[in-house]
Image (cartoon, rainbow, N blue to C red):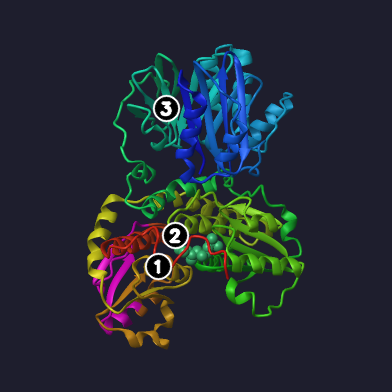
Amino acid sequence: MCGIVGYIGSNNVKEVLLDGLKELEYRGYDSAGISVLQDESFSVYKAVGKLKNLQHKAEDFKPEGFAVGIGHTRWATHGKPTELNAHPHLGEYSYVVHNGIIENYQELKKELTAKGVKFLSQTDTEVIVHLFEQNLNSIEDAFEAFKLTLSQLQGAYAILLVTKSEPDTIFFAKEGSPMIIGTDALEQKFFASSDTPLIGHAKDVIYLHDGEFGFVTPDAIALFDSCHEAVRPQFSALPESKLSAQKEGFRFFMEKEIYEQTEVIADTMLGRIQDNAIAFDELDPSLFEGINEVKFCACGTSYHSALASTYLFERHAKIRTSVEIASEFRYKEPLMTTDTLFVVISQSGETADTLETLKMAKEAGLKTLVICNVDNSSMVRLADATILTRAGIEKGVASTKAFATQVTIFWMLSLYLAGERKTLSTENITKQIASLREIPASVAVNDDLHERLKRLSKRYLHGHGFFFIGRDVFYPLALEGALKLKEISYLHAEGYPSGEMKHGPIALADPELFTIALMPQHMLYDKTKSNVEELSARDSTICAISNLTFDKADDFIPIADRDHYMLEFFEMMVVLQLLSMEIAIRLGNDVDMPRNLAKSVTVE
Ligand code: M6R
């Protein structure tokens, strides 16, 4: 995920900015840049790849005395990781850095282009600086122009802007993406998108709220709320440890990533959802021409999200859909026909088995698409088309937010295809789009629920195994729940379709077998219920997750009433992630780095 730093003061501005960006490296990035305004001229450096490339480029830059500067690490979302797409972005006499996504950038870009503005990058961010300069041309007051610019932006942002028209000022705004201002006794001001760059520099910090904006100069901080009322800054203390600051107060990165799901799913949807249609600008509609079948291929958690998508694709887009485990597919001498769209799914884009199947599909002349979280990864470079999941870097080996964003993409893609193929009515698509918009709320972690799962976890530390069971898309979710638990707790867990119990697995049922039953109201509730009753009758210990109370459950985890089964899916996903994590924590395991596992499996 992108990172921002800013500085105004008389220390070595280059060092402050580069050190700050270094502290943000843990968030992941694929390019970086800084821009420094001193003595009415800008010095700008950008580089693709690691920060040492940027340091190398800026080697001969030795600023002294007062300066204002901004810096950025970019995780590509709109446009490839190139120097032109790296921030800061230039207008004619101003620079901007931005985290988040400007949802209406295409309309704004069109308007600005019609007025003769030339764009250098493919990013959404660049519109901000051009819009600001256009506004400044007519208003002639930099702060008023900045305010007007903000009112024209839709989407999520944290923004820093510097301009030659106010050379001792940094303009800032926050809406949906984090931004912090730090101060010290020396009239220095710092900005950062998280605590870590500020530790050791700032004495006090102001955590900005959504809708807040303003400017800083060496001797003032002007802060305004979303109603444009002046706000008195509230200063807080900074955390002292950098590692704990990186985890932003969470015990593990996995926990932080579970809590981040609301934000990253919203990012994944930004710009792709319209009132009654889904738009994937990155897809050329010809990708689907002549296609009669979609074949998904992936490993691990990504395989589970792909399996869930097969239900959505056939149901919504009425297209034959299948899914394969990549390590199996590559050796089964598969029949591949050119009327099949071959889709690989991968968080990293580097998983060896999945990459190999992509190569096989390309060699067989199939059209290919990758759903991936890392731009410029091997799979992204190889596939004909890419949809990025925008989950940001995932540090926990146990995948959480990557899975959540993959399933979000698949739901959207199934509706996109349904629209293209006219297999669902506009009313149906519009209704489902309204439900899609509720995903971020459905994955928000509720404190009471988390507390309850913490307490419940102590009852599930022993036994001879877990069954996770569900039907339809809740079967892949059951597989994913079981994988999460075994990866980090080392307890034996299996996922099954509920209806399969009586074909063998039920033989294991006894009080020491824990059944985690996914019982959504809106997907085959009665069928699942009778399967769970069969297990209960054989004395398995039942932990049921549902919004409908179930009296045969030994433990019951209630979820909210939702009007679409996919929203039940997302809420249950969070329950399973948290329950696994709390069990693993009680067992004393390293949740972020479980034994025998690696984050990216680049060997066969
Ligand atoms: O990067 P990928 O999505 O291709 O990785 C696939 C699997 O290795 C990965 O999902 C693995 O199963 C995770 N540890 C699951 O939590």
Q: Which mark, by number, is residue 552? A: none
Residue underneath mark 1 = 487
Q: Residue 305: where, in percent of width, then height?
A: 52, 64
The stretch in magenta equals 532-561
Mark 1 lies within 8 Å of ligand 1 (Cβ measured): yes
Ligand 1 within 8 A of label 2's CB? Answer: yes
Q: Secondary structure at mark 3?
A: loop
User: How far is disc 2 from disc 1 in space, using C-alphas?
Assistant: 9 Å
Q: CA distance from mark 3 to mark 1?
A: 41 Å
- Residue positioned 50% across, 34% down in the render: 157
Circle 2 residues within 10 Å: few <14, some 14–19, many ≥20: some
The one of 593 and 505 positioned closer to us in this rendering = 593
Label 3 crowding class (10 Å Cα cut-off): few <14, some 14-19, many 20+?
Answer: many
| Residue 399 percent coordinates (x, y) | 45, 59
Q: Secondary structure at mark 1?
A: helix
| Amino acid type at mark 2 | Val
Q: Earlier in the sequence, mark 2 or mark 1?
A: 2
Q: Quadrant of residue 597?
A: bottom left
Question: Label 2, on which residue?
Answer: 397
> Could you tell me how far apart the alpha carbons at marks 3 and 2 are, in whole angstroms?
35 Å
Residue under numbered circle 3: 212
Q: Are marks 3 and 1 in contact (CB under 8 Å)?
A: no
Q: Are marks 2 and 1 in contact (CB under 8 Å)?
A: yes
Q: Is residue 427 above or below residue 152?
A: below
